[in-house]
Image (cartoon, rainbow, N blue to C red):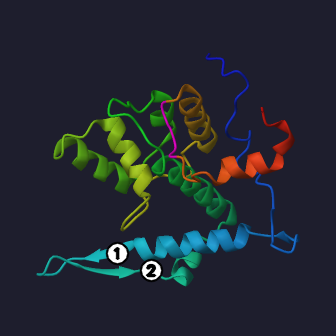
Amino acid sequence: MRANDGLDVFPSTLHSRPPTRSPDGGKVEQELPRIMCVLLAVGMTTMSMRSNTLGGTMNARTVEQLKTEYVDTEWRRTFVDFADLMDLLGDCIIDDSYVVPDRLNDAIKLSEAGQVVLDKLTRKEKVNAKDGRLMCALTLGHSDLLVDLNATDLNEIAAAINGELVDGALKFPFILGRSLYDAFAAQHDSEKIS
């Protein structure tokens, strides 16, 4: 077990998000709108392929179709949490020599569709199996979801990402420019060293 000097990037449970505040200071309930936004995004990217002589046509599923297909709100929350983790991973910077850790690889369970994609990646494209599994997770889905969310351990994924961040294997670009520094300096003006 690796000591991480008490630096935990993620909370112990993924569902303990603090409520955000509106510009006027009131609480904003984001759970249902966030789920609907993600379902809409899935509806735009989840396609059903129908073969024809021109190579197939794609019909996007609507939010209403997805809501009837995925009625379990707990599953929807799990999907949102998984999508958030994959967004986080998708935004990070990795070294050319980065190797997907076993802990992260083992936590991601692919669906049948995901396994088909992984097989194609490893056999046809000669992609490393760990990299291919993570690629499937980052993609989320196409005609079907590539990840089996019922079998995937989100807390283990979060812990694996946390470990990679603490170890410095995953990094994030400095996206705020001077804004963060300037805000801190403005709040702690009396602490400047002369």
Whole-percent x, y for residue 135 in the image: 37, 48
Q: Is 75 located above or below residue 10 in the figure? A: below
Asked which quadrant contains residue 154, the reply is top right
Whole-percent x, y for residue 187 in the image: 82, 49
Q: Residue at x 79, y 70 (%)?
A: 29
Q: Who is closer to the viewer here, 93 or 114?
A: 93
The answer to whether residue 146 is seen in the rendering is no
Residue 30 lies in the magenta-colored region: no
Q: Residue at x 50, y 72 (%)?
A: 41
Which residue matches tag 2?
61
Residue contact at pointers 2 and 1, CB within 8 angstroms: yes
Which residue matches tag 1?
48
Residue type of the residue flagged with mark 2:
Arg
- Image position of 35 (left or right of 107): right
Whole-percent x, y for residue 102 in the image: 45, 28
| Screen quadrant of the N terminus | top right
Q: For the residues marked 2 and 1, what is the alpha-carbon distance in whole angstroms?
A: 8 Å
Q: Who is closer to the viewer here, 50 or 6?
A: 6
Q: Which residues are magenta?
A: 169-173
